[in-house]
Image (tube, grey):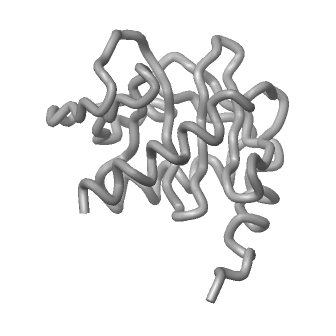
Amino acid sequence: MKKIFLVMLYLFANCTMAKVTSTEKWNIVNAQFGVVASKDGNVAMLSNAGFLFFTIGTGSCVEGDVDEQIYEISVDSTLVKMQSVCLLQIWFHMAITDEGRTFVFNKFTTLKEVKVFNSTFTTKEFNAVLAIIYNQKPAI
């Protein structure tokens, strides 16, 4: 399971990181990923598999590293357990519990902006991007 997750995240990161430009609204990249940047240069990404990833904070890493430590990262003043994976020499963070993932999704679907750690992300067009990504018919 962990290898599948890492492969998915690697493909996702390669497809989206070079194309993140908007801090004003969520955009669709490669017809299957949603992305938005914060004004301080961090990125929030939504995969078509339903995962939200964040590039927040600093620190160098080695490609493929998985930080086994669980971090409690503030999402709108509530601590959410997240794990970190290094891809493209950038730490990607994702909520690891069902409750945490649901909490983060609810924030992005109901608020105008969401603060993750010290970065603030707009939610403008998040619901539209979410609907487009999830309503795509899978290949048979």
Determine the image quadrant of residue 85.
top left
Along the viewing direction, whichever of 122 and 83 lies nearer the viewer: 83
As drawn, 118 above or below 102:
above
Relative to 49, 16 lies left or right: right
x and y percentages locating residue 108 in the rendered image: 63, 48
As drawn, 43 above or below 45:
above
Relative to 101, 20 lies left or right: right
Q: Residue at x 75, y 46 (%)?
A: 29
As drawn, 131 above or below 37:
below
Q: Residue at x 78, y 49 (%)?
A: 28
x and y percentages locating residue 90 in the rendered image: 43, 22
Q: Quadrant of the C terminus?
A: bottom right
Q: Quadrant of the N terminus?
A: bottom left
Q: Residue at x 63, y 24 (%)?
A: 120
The residue sitting at the left extreme is 68
x and y percentages locating residue 24 in the rendered image: 84, 29
Relative to 2, 16 lies left or right: right
x and y percentages locating residue 71 in the rendered image: 25, 31
Along the viewing direction, whichever of 96 and 117 lies nearer the viewer: 96
Relative to 94, 105 lies left or right: right
Determine the image quadrant of residue 137.
bottom right
The residue sitting at the bottom extreme is 140
> Total of numbered circles in the picture?
0
